[in-house]
Amino acid sequence: MKGEELRLQVEKALEEIRPFLQSDGGDIKLVSIENDNQVIVQLQGACVGCSVNQMTLKSGVEMTIKKYAPQIEHVINLGAHN
């Protein structure tokens, strides 16, 4: 899986996650995919200041992305940049 196909798989994963984040007033945006194994995302809205966002990122976001794109090793949140 390369390039555009990988991006589509990651976007599908984010679409699965997005309703849960939006129900809490947040959102997530795909920033980039580095070296075909690292996804950079940006948590937005209420997710930015949420104390559980690191747990959400690891258990929810990373797990879901790996389900769609198993070669992804890391998911990194850019932090509070709106």
Image (cartoon, rainbow, N blue to C red):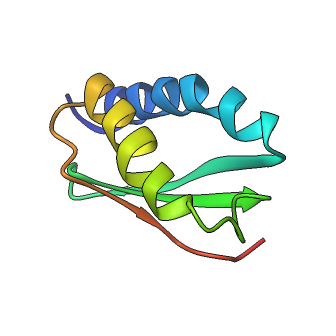
Q: What residue is at 67 percent from the left and 31 percent from the top?
A: 20
Q: Residue 21: image x %, image y %?
A: 69, 40
Q: How many marks?
A: 0
Say which quadrant the C terminus sits in. bottom right
Between 77 and 39, the residue placed more toward the observer is: 77
Residue 48 vs 8, above or below: the answer is: below
Q: Is residue 14 left or right of residue 64?
A: right
Task: Decide: is 39 above or below 61.
Answer: below
| Up/down of 4 relative to 52, above or below | above
The image quadrant that residue 22 belongs to is: top right
* Residue at the (72%, 71%) spot, across then down: 49
Residue at coordinates 54% horizontally, 33% vertically from top-left? 14
- Position in image of residue 37 (x %, y %): 20, 51
x, y (%) of residue 47? 70, 58
Left or right? Give the position of 76 relative to 48: left
Q: Nearer the viewer, residue 46 or 18?
A: 46
User: Which residue is located at x 59 percent, y 61 percent?
Assistant: 42
Quarter of the image where the N terminus is located:
top left
Q: Left or right: where does residue 82 sit relative to residue 64?
A: right
**Residue 25 placement (x, y as % from top left):** 84, 47
Task: Residue at the far bottom: name it.
Answer: 80
**Quarter location, residue 76:** bottom left
